[in-house]
Image (spheres, coloured by chain):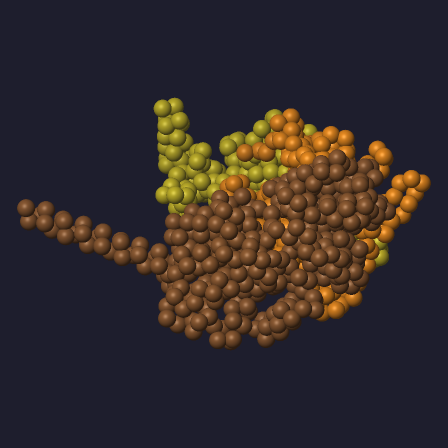
Amino acid sequence: MAFFSTEGLSISFGGLKALADVSIDVQRNSISAIIGPNGAGKTTLFNCISGIYRAQQGRIIFKDKEIHRLPPHKIAALGIARTYQNVELFAHMTTMDNLMLGRHLFLKTGLLSGATLFHSRSRSARDEIANRDRVEQIIDFLELQAARNEFVSNLPFGTQKKVELGRALALEPELLLLDEPCAGMNVEEKQDLMIWLKDIQEEFGITCLLIEHDMSLVMEISERITVLNYGRKIAEGTPDQIQNDPQVLEAYLGGDDRAEN
Amino acid sequence: MLWQIVIGGIAVGSAYALIALAMVIIYKTSEVLNFAQGDMACLSTYVTFMLLHGYGFPFWVSLPLTLLFAFVLGACCEFLFLRRAKDPTVLGLIIMTLSLEMILFGLLSWKWGSDQRELPFPITSYDTFTIGSFYVSRLEVLTFVVALVMMALLFLFFRYTKTGIAIKATQLNRDSARLMGIRTNRILMGTWGLSSVVGAVAALLIAPASTLDPYMMWDPLLKGFSSAVLGGMTSLPGAAAGGYIVGIVENLFGTYVSIEFKSAVAFAIIVLILCIKPSGLLARHYVKKV
Amino acid sequence: MKKMLLWTIVMALVIAVCAAGAVTAADAPGVSDTEIRIGQWAALTGPAAAWGAVARGAEAYFKMINDEGGIHGRMIKHLVFDDQYNPARTVAGIKELVEGPGVFAFVAGDCTACALAARDYLVEKKIIWMALGNAWSIKPDRHFFFIYPNYLDEAAILVKYAVETMGKKKIAFFYQNDDYGKGGLKGAQQQLEKYKLKLAAEVPVEPQDRDLKSHTMAIKNADPDVVILWVNPTSAVIMRKTAAAMKFAPLWMAPSTLADPALMNQITGGLWEGTIFSCLAELPDADIPLMKKYRAAFEKYVPKGERWGIMYMAGFGFAEPLVEALKKVGRDVTTDKVIAELDKMTDFKGIFGHITFRPEDRQGQKEVFIAEALKDGKSKRLSDWIKADR
């Protein structure tokens, strides 16, 4: 049984089939990629996995558990975190606050913590300190020290992407979904990102599934690649296999053709 | 004379501030203008009346029970009405809260009739403290203190508690909040409950100075709404400041300009702010990402 | 040719049916050998449900009349419907009654907007209406009888009492900013002019206002001896509480709309004591035979938990003149005969003041008396019935 898989996933929006019978498998502790032209349904697939959308057909299985009927917060609690193509941070909060929100699931103080804050100081405080430590580790890891107390809306886009990655890591996921992690990044940042992704996989033992347009990055770090076009899976395999797949070449060229028209 | 009016304005402004806070709490998270706020608060006050008068509970038992009721009422309003709306528009949501208002008003009139009643309250509005040539009623002092305490509690709550921060996150980015494991539906329910409690506190402080009747909160709601608009609808400190400003301006206007149009001041403030500075006096203006 | 004939027959039939309808309608709608149907709209639920007590009072009154044997062998059937203070419902409900079972007359009927909406239909159907008062600026009609004195007269009498009996000169007027309040204001001004006096302060209030500090201060600054409260109970309560907080204690006067000392005492937390107010009807606890009889009827016909207050009494009072006229008309009841009988009514005395109707003057009662609110919601009558000077 695969660590994570989708089986025959389909969803359509008002007659437009965004996903049609998509099945993918992801092995534990691997880095896999999903590629495809714009509008191929990649982000829709992520939205289905994270519970934002509900697939009309098919199943999503994570660690032998069906998750396609669960709400997003439960999916997050099971250990799936994600980032967005366009960054979805809590704009009027600092980097630190954003990362701490990633620790939401680990904070033990409940609804009445406001009232108990002063009484059970030690417990609340210990809890808080432990979580802050974890966040500090992530800040160090992603080299976000300078941005720690900045409002995220004031940060450059590349840094915001790092904050979002950090926030996802704060959730301590087992599966990390990355939607175009290096879009809008410069070459140097891309190099860093590639190293971090490797570290995330190897040191933290987190399985990564990424959507990416940057083929050099995809080919270099992914172990398996799935290609989507018009909501359908048209190919999957190792980078070598994909690079030589005639259907893939056709899809990309065809897509370009249409774009020009 | 002038200072007496300002003191009076601050006193009544405290109640407006609480209502404005209640409205802003909901608006921030749900982006709904809750016009049922007044009647929700009014219903809670009637529950206090019922507990005190009907069941003969002492005030200090009735008060927490009322606040509990207010919380459940608010949560139910969100759960039973607002949540049922499928992909609602802003207008749709406003219409929903207006209908909720009518339902609650009908319920109030049906259950208790439109007779004016006196809410038995431990402090009257006509026992006064006199400081030099100024006087201020005990109820006004209590209102002022309670408003400040509520504001402080809300500040601490939003700033330092897990739930408070989760509410803030939900308000800023609902989808992301869900991905952080925040149960945003529950948060929305909770904010409606919280808002309802704040509104109920305001109504409990307004009732003893006038009469308890189904219309009780119409005027204060309008003033509270105007205060919230003045503060920019999304800012808690803004809403509180707005409450005091509306209270003071209205009283000054009533005394020095025209008593006949005193109540229109609140309307004028809404129109003026929407024309000149729609983001309000204290709110950070931010454009929502589409 | 045949077609023409057919048309003529159809037309003739239509006219005949209409004419027949018109004849019965003009005759005595809602009257059968055994009953007289009297309609009433009232806000039994909704925002003005307090007014519903008027309808329940009338109900008790008619039950009492029926138990006494009815009117010349006919029982009164009282048809009340709930309009929830909503004019659209009022009109629909009236139509349902008039065009369904048929109604001989309407009594009372609250809510300005509802009454205005009902007016034209009642004129069209030629139905007698014993209305509250014409203070609502309802256009008179041959079929309408207004019972209550208008606000101008009532305010004039209050001022007259303050000046002539109590010797007060500095009077302030606190009024609701609408027809009700302005009517009272005008009456007070006109009466004061007769003494070459002016109001010390005229302060309007919006009925929904809950913060009356500036209003109170405006009145207090004029330093009046007397303040007349021409407002709704809520505004009166807020004014009294605010004034108490400001240690402002003039002599307070109020019109009959606030003449429920038990209620006012309760909702002001006892501050109402000492208020001088005008009454349109005998006090609810008056020690006169008629009131005792009505109180007994109230005990008998109204379910427990209701309070014998002015609203209930008014229900009895509005129905009295009609019943009186029906009794005088005898067995042969028609709309015209009852109107003629009502127009002969002179100084009829029920629990309201003396009522006189004339074809050219349908304002029945023109007098009030003055009372004082005592401790614990009791009251004391201070004067005999006083007529307005005009």
Q: Quick one: which chain is brown?
A: C
Using the image, determine if residue A2 lies above or below residue C327. above
Query: Viewer-proximal residue, A219 or C273?
Result: C273
Residue drawn at (70%, 41%), measured in percent from left and top? C191
Using the image, determine if residue B275 lies above or below residue A132. above
Q: Quick one: which chain is orange?
A: B
Residue drawn at (60%, 28%), measured in percent from left and top? A185
Q: Quick one: which chain is yellow?
A: A
Counting from the top left corner in percent of width and height, residue A156 is at 66, 28
Counting from the top left corner in percent of width and height, residue B85 is at 50, 49
Q: Is residue C156 visible?
A: yes
Relative to A46, C184 lies left or right: right
Counting from the top left corner in percent of width and height, residue C243 is at 81, 46
Q: Is residue B42 visible?
A: no
Relative to B279, A210 lies left or right: left
Residue that lies at the very extreme toward the right in this rendered image: B132
The N terminus of chain B sits in image quarter: top right
Relative to C146, A173 lies left or right: right
